[in-house]
């Protein structure tokens, strides 16, 4: 079975992990209350979607 | 080869999936709106709408088919007695899914699935319905003032006939006036 010959250096490990990045969640402004909300979903602040009250606030 | 079910499979086995969907449908008809994961909501929608369609048909065969899924007696009765009559003039689309963001704990995307409101006016928006309505009008107009036509249609036809008479009369007058001018 193939196994690594050498221990991976801290530098190499960190270089690899430097590419693990998070991206910001895409949001749109709620048409009712202008607060950021997920696109195609109900607004969690005012609880409306498509002009209709979906969640009781 | 049978067409595979649309959407992802649920649970560990087909029996588990059937039970989960049956329980979700029962809860939906019991409470009118339930919060569940997006995946389950998407799988539930076709099942729930088919059950409502069966409930609208309301014959013995339909009752037996629905009874296999909705095993709670109260919910079953509610579906046939209160939910189905609400949707007599709605051609499908009895449920609505609204996404409500990720769940705390496992960040599963959640959604609310609910039974929609009663349709106020019978919507004539499909092409076939419009065509049918237009055809009915034409038939009524052609039937004219024959007595065998239904009262309402006859009334409509009579109105149309009057209108056409008035138009033709106006046209005839105009033609006569032109003829007079020429003379």
Image (spheres, coloured by chain):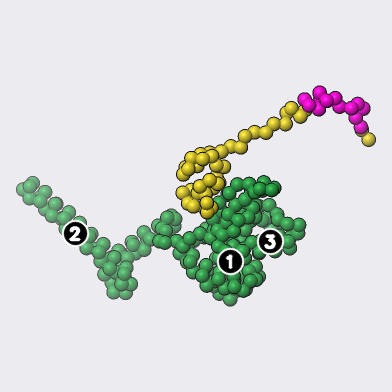
Q: Position of residue B163 (x, y in %)?
A: 22, 60
Q: Position of residue B6 (x, y in %)?
A: 65, 53
**Distance in Å between CA atoms under marks 1 and 3:** 15 Å
The residue sitting at 25% across, 66% down in the picture is: B158
Quarter the N terminus of chain B occupies: bottom right
Q: Earlier in the sequence, mark 2 or mark 1?
A: 1
Instruction: Say whether residue A34 is magenta.
Output: no
Residue B168, above or below A50: below
Q: Is residue B165 left or right of residue B67?
A: left
The residue sitting at 51% across, 40% down in the picture is: A35
Residue projecting furthest to the top:
A11
Q: Position of residue B95 (x, y in %)?
A: 54, 58
Q: Chain of mark 2?
A: B
Q: Quadrant of residue B11?
A: bottom right
Q: Earlier in the sequence, mark 1 or mark 3?
A: 3
The residue sitting at 67% across, 33% down in the picture is: A22
Instruction: Bin the neighbour count of mark 2 within 10 Å (Cα to Cα): few under 14, some 14-19, many 20 and up.
Output: few
Q: Dots 1 and 3: beta carbons under 8 Å?
A: no
The residues colored magenta run A3-15
Q: Dots 2 and 1: beta carbons under 8 Å?
A: no
Residue denoted by label 2: B166
Q: Nearer the viewer, mark 2 or mark 3?
A: 3
Chain that is coloured yellow in the picture: A
The residue sitting at 48% across, 40% down in the picture is: A34
Residue denoted by label 1: B30
Q: Quadrant of residue B79?
A: bottom right
Q: Earlier in the sequence, mark 2 or mark 3?
A: 3
């Amino acid at each position: 079975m193939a196994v690594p010959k050498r221990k991976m250096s801290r530098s190499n490990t960190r270089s690899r992990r430097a590419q693990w990045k998070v991206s910001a969640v895409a949001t749109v402004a709620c048409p009712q209350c202008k607060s950021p909300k997920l696109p195609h979903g109900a607004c969690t602040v005012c609880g409306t979607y498509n002009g209709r009250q979906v969640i009781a606030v | 080869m049978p067409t595979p079910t649309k959407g992802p499979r649920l649970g560990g086995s087909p029996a588990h999936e059937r039970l989960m969907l049956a329980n979700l449908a029962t809860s939906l008809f019991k409470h009118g709106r339930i919060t569940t994961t997006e995946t389950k909501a998407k799988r539930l929608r076709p099942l729930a709408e088919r059950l409502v369609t069966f409930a609208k048909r309301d014959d013995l065969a339909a009752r037996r088919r629905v009874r296999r899924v909705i095993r709670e007696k109260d919910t079953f009765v509610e579906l046939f007695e209160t939910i189905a009559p609400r949707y007599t003039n709605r051609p499908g689309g009895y449920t609505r899914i609204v996404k409500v963001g990720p769940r705390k704990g496992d960040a599963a995307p959640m959604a609310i699935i609910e039974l929609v409101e009663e349709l106020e006016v019978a919507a004539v928006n499909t092409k076939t319905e419009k065509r049918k309505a237009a055809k009915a009008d034409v038939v009524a107009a052609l039937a004219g003032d024959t007595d065998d036509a239904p009262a309402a249609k006859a009334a409509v036809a009579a109105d149309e006939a009057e209108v056409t008479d008035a138009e033709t009369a106006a046209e005839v007058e105009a033609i006569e006036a032109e003829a007079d001018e020429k003379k």
